[in-house]
Amino acid sequence: MKLAASYGDIRLMAPDDAAVSFFKSPFAAHETGSAVDIAYGDFGSPASSPVDGVIMDIREFETPTPFRDRNFKEYLTAIRCGRLIVRILHVKPDLGIGDRVRTGEYFGTFIRSGYFYFWNFSHMHVEVRMPDDYLRATSDMPLDLPVGVVRRDFLRGVDRGSDIFDFTGDVVDSCKRYALVDCPDYSTDGHFNGYSVGGFLLDGFIHTRDHALHRFGLVGKCRDAPPFDCFRSIGNSFMVHSSSVSLGVFDRENRPLDVAGASFILFFDKPLIKLVPTGYGEHLPQCGDVVSVQIKRYKE
Amino acid sequence: MKVEDFEFPEDRLYLKNHVWVKHHRDRIMIGLTELGQSLSKEIVHIDLPDVGDVIPKDDFLIAYETIKAVSQISLPFECTVVSVNDRLWDDPNIINSDPYNICMVEVRGDCDERDLMTAEAACAYYGGLIAKERERYAGY
């Protein structure tokens, strides 16, 4: 198990093959850096507890739905850890109130609920809360991100100081929901692996068209200022208006590909870039294709 | 009138933030549409104004939270709060059971009906929004 995030002496742990994100989600707790999404496995597969503690509440509830006749179940599991509560969503718990859980041990299965987009990985949403306030969406208990100094990025064919950050790689997986790009020019701080710009790892979804999310994150310890216009900093992270950059995805012949956007998250293992189609089943590059994902900074 | 099985009664007007507006004597009743409540299930917290509050145009009048999301209601006109549905403090989820008969607040204000949608216009607008929301669930 590896450290995904912490709050005080509460350590939120994740399996070695997990990926994490603090800012890819549009939901409230992520606005303040108070939540981490820990992704691994698949929908219906086992989920491990990120902490030691005792389950003190389980809520089953319905999520938003644009269907009159379809409902989606969701589950909140509240685990008491000392004086605080760890709140987990998107896992159907297989234990009961009063049961003890241990870090890394099975406690339920991943579900897909009405909060998900079709292109999301299975993941658990984790926060640390006060015992008398663990139901509401808003939280201002920012997590500590275990992100250190990121190795300076070495971008193929692009000078430092350029306005274009280019990630070129091979498509290694492609389905109706997304395509995954393996770009060898990735960076690390020794703990997380990901794709960096100006010494900061990208964490978020950068869209090419209208989307609910209008920001993404940059994480890392760096003496330099972030390369994009940031509107908020929280610890080792910065939040960027999506409108301050443009995203383009191109094929080997430099022809633009029509995608909804690209998702960047932090991996303990080899990182991958996720390309999201304009709609479920819409065109995406196929396995073996070479693509270039370019983030261009808008100049004033 | 319906779009995708969601009702939009013709006896009131609508905003683009899932709000219905209905004139009643010298007051304006404010509530959440059936679609709005379907997209806001399991409300766990609500912030309501106080009677007498003057709410500037586009400032938030009501805010409510589910377990994961926050929503805010604002009006395109300045208003004075005349009454608040106190039942919402104890159980905000009464909105989910009967959205068109649960008034959240009543206000007075200079409401220009050109800023509001008829049921027909609302069905056209929300039909597009429903289609876009449903794209998220493709493949489920």
Image (cartoon, coloured by chain):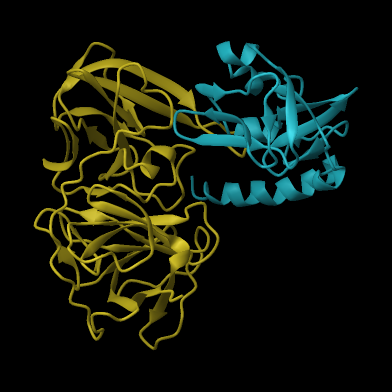
- Residue nearest the viewer, comparing A121 with B111: B111
Query: What residue sits 51% from the left and 65% below the top?
Result: A282
Figure check: B50 above or below A280: above
Tell me where residue A51 sits by quadrant: top left
Q: Is residue A199 above or below residue B68?
A: below
* Chain A pictured colour: yellow
Among the chains pictured, the one given cyan colouring is B
Q: Which residue is drawn at the image coordinates 85% and 44% (left, top)?
A: B120
Q: Residue furthest right?
A: B25
Q: Quadrant of residue B68?
A: top left
Q: What percent of the width, then of the height, locates residue A98?
A: 24, 11
Q: In x, y percent, where is residue B98?
A: 71, 20
Image location (x, y in percent) of residue B44: 50, 22
Q: Residue A222 is drawn in which quadrant?
A: bottom left
Residue A194 in the image: above or below residue A160: above
Q: Is residue A256 left or right of residue A2?
A: right
Residue at point 68% right, 15% down? B85
In screen coordinates, is A69 left or right of A280?
Answer: right
Q: Is residue B127 visible?
A: yes
Residue A290 can be seen in this image: no
Q: Residue at x 51, y 22 (%)?
A: B45
Pick whichever, B106 or A281, lies toward us: B106
The quadrant of the rendering that contains the N terminus of chain B is: top right
As drawn, the residue found furthest toward the left would be A190
| A61 relative to A198, above or below | above
Nearest to the observer: residue B49 or residue B104: B49
Q: How many marks?
A: 0
In the image, A171: left or right of B21? Answer: left
Whole-percent x, y for residue A265 in the image:
28, 55
